[in-house]
């Protein structure tokens, strides 16, 4: 008797009530699923439909193997318990990853299912700890690039985006294909992935000879980002908030008069009467089409903010509630957030709700010529992150909640495609695996205007890229705080602005102080607006510095366009950790304060106050030209780079040119 059988291209194990199935899912990749007492589910949370790949399966009585290209899974049954354990090897026979052994005095399980009475399971999947570096997992607000020895919540919050794909220095990529709220711990003795509530275990693993190959195989499995449209490559102007049509237009006109190129200008939140109305408030924006048309004549696209909250007093609330288009609270009031009114989030996991919201936005924005949407609050941001108290069309929040931002992006992407738009990029505050295929440009949330937050963003952006989300940006200068008249803030802003030139998208935003309350003609409160946030508002000395950085970004358009093509075609991140381009240089694995912007530009932002130099490591195997001075250096050494306020240290590999 064998515990294993072959079913088509899949290897099946059954015993002790568990069905385990492994099958090829793309080149050099395997998908692994397991379920208790029921058949395997064909869920498509992030993975695209099955791509046929050759499988070599060998079955014995208590052992079996399945090979797909460079990746082999070896399964063996511990006969005293009858449980199956899996180990993964590359084409050289080197161990990549192994589940912990079953049994023993501790009676451990590599796949431990804890039942919820009357329903599904909490799940812990455990792998042996090993000496490796790990990157990816999305965006966490920590000064930590290497995830090894870290513990991370698998849940979304404002400024935290859980994208459960990691890349190992041992040569594999691993996707936890489960949108449940949970946790992952990358310990010395054990790696544990946990889901608080789930119907089955589901993960995907791939092997590659290079980080580029792993990125490509992951993108093939979950989707490539579209090609970034031309208007996404330049400078984006934003603040909290341009509160009326004439104010927004006058800012755009002033940029135009000064000959400062702006690709996108943004109309932020509460330009609507009530959240969930999905339209401009006529008192403040009397002629949206004329506004969009004038901006286009100046070479600017308008982006408008959309929130998923629906106010209980919104003109759409009654219909959406009656049609079950809203998230449901399991207990208590049907209120998810109290901000600008009592409201509940629309259920983006419901296809009918996505279609309804898009139709409203098409009628009131897209039909006026708006091509970009700012999908804020995408986690979604509950007043209290009580994940157990909310239910979606797709299931309980505990089981499926992490897929919400992906569905939010999908609703607008599908609608824009339906109306014939191909050049799609939408700004979104959160993402999950697969979001990249829906034109999601993720930004790092409502972060503080301080140096520590600034440093955290670099690690966040690099790990987002390693997690398969190539489009990423920040609020230049941070969101919370920052007085334009404060010299200390001006220094922070200048350094952040310089770094943004070498981010996938260069976007200025923030709630500057002091703020001002806005009122309607009838005396009712609308919403506050922050202070000035345009490049000429930070002092006469800084204005030409910021302007020059914007023009530098314009000159870099051909290079940035090339990086976006690589992301679209190959799945490579735009911002890359040093080791990504220099895997044979051991020194590059410990560096987290400099990075590669594409293959040719080494960027070393100044992230400390009051300094005018910084140390930069130049990797082995290349000659490096300092962009600012033209000096040439050999690789393998650390240099002291000059960095006055108008300079960001950038070194070009082997004489490359990044400015047109």
Image (spheres, grey):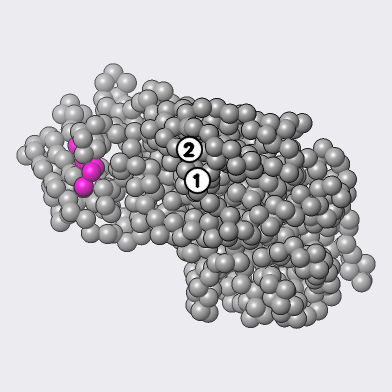
Q: Which residue is tagged 2? A: 623
* Residue 70 magenta-highlighted: yes
**Neighbour class for label 1 at 10 Å: few (<14), some, many (≥20)?**
some
What is the residue that sits farthest to the left in this orientation? 1
For the residues labelled 1 and 2, say whether their Cβ atoms are less than 8 Å apart.
Answer: yes
| Quarter occupied by the C terminus | bottom right
Magenta range: 68-74
Residue shown at 21% from the left, 47% from the top = 69
Q: Between disc 1 and disc 2, whose residue precedes? A: 2
Q: Is residue 194 above or below residue 372?
A: above
Q: Nearer the viewer, residue 299 or 147?
A: 299
Q: Secondary structure at mark 2?
A: strand
The residue lying toward the viewer, choosing from 261 and 23, is: 261
Q: Is residue 599 left or right of residue 457?
A: left
Q: Main secondary structure of the magenta part?
A: strand
Residue at label 1?
Answer: 655
The residue that appears at 92% across and 71% down in the rendered structure is 522
Which quadrant does the N terminus fall into? top left
- Residue 254, magenta (yes or no): no
Count of marks, rendered view: 2
The Cα–Cα distance between marks 1 and 2, rounded to whole angstroms, is: 7 Å
Percent of width and height locating residue 105: 28, 18
Residue 407: horizontal and vertical position, in percent? 51, 61
Task: State the residue at coordinates (61%, 72%).
Answer: 371
Q: Secondary structure at mark 1?
A: loop
């Amino acid at each position: 008797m064998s515990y294993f059988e072959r079913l088509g291209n899949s290897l099946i194990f059954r015993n002790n009530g568990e069905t385990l199935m492994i099958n090829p899912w793309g080149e050099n990749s395997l998908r692994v699923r397991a379920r208790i007492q029921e058949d395997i589910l064909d869920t498509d949370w992030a993975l695209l439909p099955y791509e046929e790949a050759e499988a070599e399966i060998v079955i014995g009585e208590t052992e079996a193997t399945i090979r797909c290209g460079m990746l082999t899974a070896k399964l063996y049954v511990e006969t005293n318990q009858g449980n199956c354990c899996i180990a993964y090897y590359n084409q050289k026979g080197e161990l990549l990853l192994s589940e912990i052994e079953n049994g023993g005095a501790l009676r451990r399980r590599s796949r431990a299912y804890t039942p919820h009475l009357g329903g599904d399971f909490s799940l812990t999947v455990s792998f042996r700890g090993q000496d490796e570096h790990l990157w990816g997992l999305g965006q966490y607000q920590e000064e930590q690039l290497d995830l090894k020895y870290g513990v991370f919540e698998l849940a979304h919050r404002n400024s935290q985006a859980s994208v459960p794909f990691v890349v190992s220095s041992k040569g594999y990529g691993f996707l936890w294909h489960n949108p449940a709220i949970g946790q992952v711990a990358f310990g010395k003795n054990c790696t544990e992935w946990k889901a608080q509530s789930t119907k089955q275990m589901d993960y995907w693993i791939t092997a590659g000879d290079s980080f580029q190959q792993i990125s490509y195989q992951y993108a093939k499995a979950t989707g490539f980002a579209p090609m970034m449209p031309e208007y996404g490559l330049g400078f984006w102007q934003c603040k909290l908030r341009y509160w009326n049509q004439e104010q927004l237009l006058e800012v755009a006109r002033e940029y135009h008069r000064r000959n400062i190129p702006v690709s996108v200008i943004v109309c932020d939140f509460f330009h609507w009467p009530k959240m969930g109305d999905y339209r401009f408030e006529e008192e403040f924006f009397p002629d949206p089409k004329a506004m969009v048309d004038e901006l286009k004549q100046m070479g600017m696209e308008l982006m408008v903010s959309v929130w998923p909250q629906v106010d209980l007093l919104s003109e759409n609330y009654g219909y959406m509630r009656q049609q079950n288009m809203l998230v449901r609270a399991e207990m208590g009031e049907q209120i998810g957030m109290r901000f600008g009114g009592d409201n509940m989030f629309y259920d983006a996991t419901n296809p009918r709700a996505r279609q309804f919201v898009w139709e409203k936005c098409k009628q009131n924005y897209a039909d006026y010529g708006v091509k970009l949407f700012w999908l804020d609050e995408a986690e979604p941001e509950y007043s209290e992150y009580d994940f157990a108290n909310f239910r979606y069309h797709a299931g309980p929040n505990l089981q499926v909640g992490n897929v919400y931002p992906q569905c939010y992006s999908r609703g607008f992407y599908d609608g824009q495609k339906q109306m014939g738009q191909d050049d799609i990029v939408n700004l979104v505050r959160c993402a999950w695996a697969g979001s990249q295929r829906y034109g999601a440009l993720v930004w790092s949330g409502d972060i503080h205007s301080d140096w520590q937050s600034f440093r955290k963003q670099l690690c966040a952006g690099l790990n987002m890229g390693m997690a398969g989300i190539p489009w990423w940006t920040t609020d230049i200068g941070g969101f919370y705080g920052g007085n334009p008249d404060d010299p200390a803030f001006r220094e922070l802003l200048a350094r952040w602005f310089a770094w943004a030139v070498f981010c996938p998208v260069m976007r200025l935003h923030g709630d500057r102080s002091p703020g001002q309350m806005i009122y309607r003609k009838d005396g009712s409160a609308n919403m506050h607006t922050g202070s000035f946030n345009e490049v000429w508002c930070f002092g006469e000395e800084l204005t030409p510095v910021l302007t020059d950085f914007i023009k530098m970004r314009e000159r870099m358009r051909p290079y940035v366009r090339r990086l976006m093509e690589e992301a679209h075609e190959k799945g490579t991140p735009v911002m890359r950790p040093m080791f990504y381009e220099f895997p044979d240089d051991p020194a590059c694995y410990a560096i987290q304060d400099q990075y590669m912007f594409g293959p040719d530009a080494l960027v070393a932002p100044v992230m400390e106050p009051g300094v005018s130099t910084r140390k930069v490591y130049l990797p082995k195997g290349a000659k490096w030209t300092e962009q600012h001075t033209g000096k040439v250096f050999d690789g393998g050494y650390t240099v002291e780079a000059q960095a006055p306020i108008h300079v960001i240290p950038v070194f070009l590999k082997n004489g490359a040119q990044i400015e047109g």
